[in-house]
Amino acid sequence: MASEDAPNPFDDPAADPFEIARVAAELIARRSGVERHDIALTLGSGWGRAADLIGETVATIPATDIPGFSRSAVPGHVGTIRSVLLPNGKHALVLGARTHYYEGHGVRRVVHGVRTAAATGASVMILTNGAGGIKETWGPGTPALISDHINLTAASPLEGATFIDLTDLYSQRLRDIAHEVDASLDEGVYVQFRGPHYETPAEVQMAKTIGGHIVGMSTALEAIAARQSGMEVLGMSLITNLAAGISPIPLSHSEVIEAGKTAEPVISDLLARIVERL
């Protein structure tokens, strides 16, 4: 069993990240008693309550017990992996431990949760986050679907001569299902910056100019890895604040946490109703 202080398998640069994911998936199957998961969810800031609403939790595993995972460094993220039995008999894997690119552990660690989910059998990956909004009509607490992304991290989870088409990365089918649940849901292009600092007003204007509507520090790299693994991706952002220069007040992480807590009951119920239809 791994622990918080145990050597991480990614410390070996020669390690195969897909083999590490396979081993992690096998351990999750043993610890949860669930041989295969059908859907996986990464729950970002404000989305955590959805894990309690989508079905019956059959196992909760500390993330640090699973190879390749580490305790989340961000307040508002739980450090567990949960196996949930859905009402339709399918199983969902809920990833509460997310490694962000700005933590400096490398892209392999960032996308390990997604690759592990794929190795458990999941064919649908739901990626959620708390983010800044560029559209002035989006107030704090607004959920938005991700229709596409712009990756400004200067990194990719793909290694070597690996060419993956991202034309329809964020599944239109899944977004259509989300719209059936809530026709008022707006959509936007997510722009992933490296972080951990918030974007400057000039950077937000740049994101707006190149077609962005949402700014954040996660999701894009994970979505690319999900596509490489053959998964269908649904991306959702909770707009926790207007982005720098759009908002008249300075940004703070406490504001993000507070907006997430306020919106959590509503957006978690929304996500649960979407999962019901998958």
Image (tube, rainbow, N blue to C red):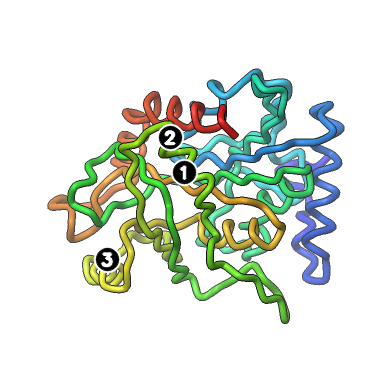
> Considering only vertical position in the picture, is 140 above or below 181?
below
Residue at the spot 23% in from the left edge and 50% down from the top edge: 242
The Cα atoms of the two marked residues, 1 and 2, are separated by: 6 Å
Judge from the rendering whether residue 162 lies leftward or rightward of residue 239; answer left or right.
right
Residue located beneath label 1 in the image: 176
Q: Residues within 10 Å of mark 3 (few under 14, many from 20)?
A: many
What residue appears at the point 44 percent right and 60 percent down from the top-left corner? Answer: 148
- Residue at 29% from the left image edge and 41% from the top image edge: 255
Q: Disc 1 on helix, strand or loop? A: helix
Q: Is residue 33 above or below residue 248?
A: above
| Residue at the disc numbered 3 | 204
Left or right relative to 82: residue 3: right
Q: Are marks 1 and 2 in contact (CB under 8 Å)?
A: yes
Give the residue drawn at x 64%, y 40%: 40
- The nearer-to-camera label among 2 and 3 is 2
* Label of residue 190 in the image: none
Name the kind of residue labelled 3 in the image.
Val
Q: Which residue type does callout 2 highlight?
A: Glu
Local secondary structure at mark 2: helix
Q: Toward which corner of the image does residue 240 lie, by quadrant?
A: top left
Gap in angstroms between the C-alphas marked 2 and 3: 31 Å
- Marks 1/3: CA–CA distance: 28 Å
Nearer the observer, 264 or 87? 87
Q: Which residue occupies the extreme bottom position in the image? A: 161
Q: Earlier in the sequence, mark 2 or mark 3?
A: 2
- Return the x and y of residue 115 as percentages of the image width and height: 71, 53
Give the image location of residue 128, x and y in percent: 49, 44
Q: Amino acid at mark 1?
A: Asp
Residue 56 x %, y %? 65, 18
> Could you say which quadrant of the image residue 140 lies in?
top left
Above or below, 122 relative to 89: below
Q: Which residue is mark 2?
A: 180
